[in-house]
Amino acid sequence: MEVAFYIAAAVAIIATMLMLRDLNVVHALLYLIVSLLAVAVVFYVIGAPFMAALEVIIYAGAIVVLFVFVVMMLNLGEHAVAMEQRWLTPGIWIGPTALAGVLLGEVAYLAARGGAQMEAQMVAPKQVGIGLFGPYLIGVELASMLLLAGLVGAYHLGVRRRQRTEIRHARDTHERRVAPSSDVVLAGTDRPARTP
Amino acid sequence: MLFSLGLIGLLVRRNLIVVLMSLEVMLNAAGLAFVVAGSRWQQADGQIVFLFILTMAATEVAIGLALVLQVYHQFKSLDADVLSEMRG
Amino acid sequence: MQLLWLIVAMPLVSALVLAVLGSHLSRRVVAAWGVGSIGVSAVITMLVAVEFVSSPPAGNAYTQFLWTWINVAGFQPHIGFYLDALSLVMIFVVTFVGFWIHLYSAEFMMHDEGYSRFFAYMNLFVASMLTLLLADNLLLLYLGWEGVGLCSYLLIGFWYRDVANGLAARKAFIVTRVGDTAMLLGLFLLFTSLGTVQIQDLMHRASEHWPMGSTMAAAAALLLLGGAVGKSAQLPLQVWLPDAMAGPTPTSALIHAATMVTAGVYLVARTHVLFALAPPAQFAVAVVGGATLLLAGCSALTQHDIKRVLAYSTVSQIGYMFLALGVGAWSAAIFHFFTHAFFKALLFLGAGVIIEALQDEHSIFRMGGLRKELPVAFWTFLIAGCSLAGLPFITAGFYSKDLIIWGAWSAAQGHPSFWIVGMIGALLTALYTFRVIFRVFFGPIQIPVGKRPGYVMTVPLVILAFFAIVAGSVKDPLLAFVQSTLPPMVEANAAGMTETLSEVVAALAFLSGLYVAYLCHLQKRILADGAVAHPAGRALHAWWFADWGFDWLYDKAFVQPFLWVAQLNKNDFIDAFYTGIARLTEASYRAVQLTQTGQVRWYAAGIAAGSVVFLAMVVFA
């Protein structure tokens, strides 16, 4: 079983790395799916089969599908690939990699101090259910309210009224503001890639 | 590890959709950490928390993508740097 | 004599009242206060004088103690007035002449803005001058000294809207400041070595502790001389007085002719013991006086602004007084001061009438023929001019000047060369005086007369003219009176000359000066023009016109370097410190501004970095 764990972990990491590098958004999405599936395998191996199932169904199945919908709706095409190419200069990777590397180092240090060993015993879904209806009942209710809020919000944001004349929502409440800065109007095609 | 990768992706890519994807990766990594911890201590709490994380991630993706759609219609671009105007 | 303090208090109170309430009072009331306070002072002075002369107090001096000023570790100067013959003569002149000048200026300044301000300053001046004259300790004297300096500055720059007036005032103040500093040093020296600032005590202790010819006495005397030189506009600090003519004419009459500029003479006379103990210092006084009187006489010969001629004339006449002090003819100097106050004030007031009548015309070469147009001004000016030049036997100036010139030969520290200098000075005096008179009052009328003076202005002229003549007759009583305080003039080396012979030579000098002036400025004016047109003559004329180059010299030696240093230090390091703070703030603002990019990825990176640091702190600390 341990072998499966290591293989799945490796796949997840490699898939994520590939996802970051790919210029085409759809390819990146596919890599993401692979990564999520690998993580599901990891869940199964460490004894949380219910979570594995949830991971596949909700995460890979619903969320990524949403991404795909949006990508398809926006219909960016070749133009987007060209843009991405211009944005992603090699030098851009240095800073974030360093930052994330430091973070990784710290976390690894902390984890190593913990001295964990692998136990492959399963925690049954039944226990999860009992926990949900017991101590974590409030959490469940809150989660459902969160979902409701998300639903309403997504609907509201998604509605497009063709006759909307105001450019920026905030403009209404601050009429006295002077003319906006110039970098907003452009569609971003001529802005050079900049490291954050 | 996954978290770090997700962080890198967040910081590097300018396409908003990829940014959101990286965010998902980070959430996923955090949830993985929780489940592993729950398994280590043989408690159900880790998985319960992961459930909540999952729920939250789903909601956030929904709203985030709706916002992305709005951004695209307003600015005609998915560049994260375009959204840098600080007035209003 | 108890009323001594009122003499000072009246003008002081009036000055305060006018300063505070003046702008709310009508001109009549302001004039009444301003002139009246000096009038009351003059009356009280005369009462005090009568009492003093008829029943002199013990020791020929009267002290009035008012209150203790400072009381620190045994140093206790107090506010007290000391009246003896010397100060009595001087306060009489100040209040009497001052009264007539104030009366004159009541009408003269009628059309100027700042009427109450003028009278406030003038009254404050008189109060300070009286404090100076009546002070019984050097510190109070210095207070009065500074007070008159301040009022001089305020009054020279009275018409402050013209920048040139302010500059002239500033120049006067700074130049006299140089002298004041020397005087202060002398004061410190005297205090630290003799332990008191009371003048009479100082004189006693000096003669006890310091032998004849001691260096301490010489040092103190020379420092006090420095102060006197500054205030009285003698060489080398005479540069401020001609420019001080920028002030109103009554100011010039009061301050820069009759009173303030004689403060130096008073100081030397007061501390005569020190000078007597230090012959080199006294010799320096005489040299300064002699050199100044020649220098100023030559400069007066070339000026074309009527007031500047009179200013140089004042410098020259005070040179005579210093010469007298320097050769030991103390009472002669005071007598000359007495007469000079009358005729010089009269000259200035007359000049004021002329300037007003010709709508502010100052140049004598553009005036002419005013003899018939302004008769009162003409006759009084003529009388004063003759007195200044020394018309024999009639005028007071003849007697006083002649006494000095005779003393220059015959007194203990006299020397024939001083006599010669005095004679040449007399010649020059006659020359420049009559140059002005002939140019202004004779000849064709160039500018028609606009405004004729009223009674308020002509009465003072007449009164002062009367005294310019009559004052000479009080010569002997006055001298005897003053000699109760100052040592009499000892005729040590009278060989080779008698007083009568000296007087005859002086009369000849007067006549020759008159004749030459008549020739050049009335008969054949082309002679004067020719002298100036000749290259040597023109150079000499230009040099004397510019006050023998002193202004230029001081400008190059002191003013320019100072300005250069000031310019260099304009962004001095203290400034740099404060601007540095501002720039630092600005720089840090810009630095912080860089973090506000508005880009979400940048902020995410910030969060990540922050969490990294936080974790590190938790883990490793």
Image (cartoon, coloured by chain):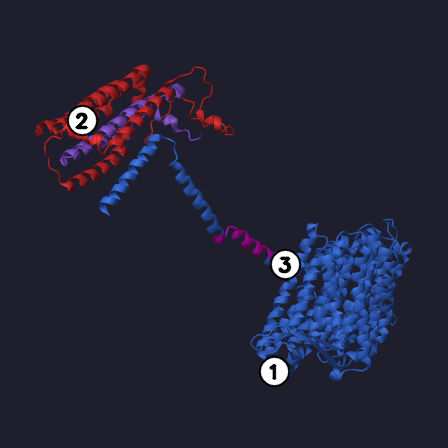
Chain colours: A red, B purple, C blue
Could you tell me what secondary structure mostly forms the magenta stretch?
helix
Is disc 3 on the same chain as disc 2?
Answer: no
Front residue (pair C319, C600): C600
In the image: residue B64, left or right of residue C286: left
Structural distance between the alpha carbons of marks 2 and 1: 116 Å
Q: Chain of mark 3?
A: C
Q: Residues within 10 Å of mark 3 (few under 14, many from 20)?
A: few
Give the mark, 3 or 1, whose residue is nearer the N terminus. Answer: 1
- Amino acid beneath label 3: Leu
The region drawn magenta spans C559-574
Q: Chain of mark 2?
A: A
Residue A51 got which mark? 2
Residue C255, visible in the rendered structure = no
Q: Determine the secondary structure under disc 1.
A: loop
Is disc 1 on the same chain as disc 3?
Answer: yes
Q: Determine the secondary structure under disc 3.
A: helix
Residue A69 percent coordinates (x, y): 29, 16
User: Which label lies toward us, 2 or 3?
Assistant: 2
Structural distance between the alpha carbons of marks 2 and 3: 102 Å
- Amino acid beneath label 2: Met
Structural distance between the alpha carbons of marks 3 and 1: 38 Å
Q: Which residue is mark 1?
A: C210
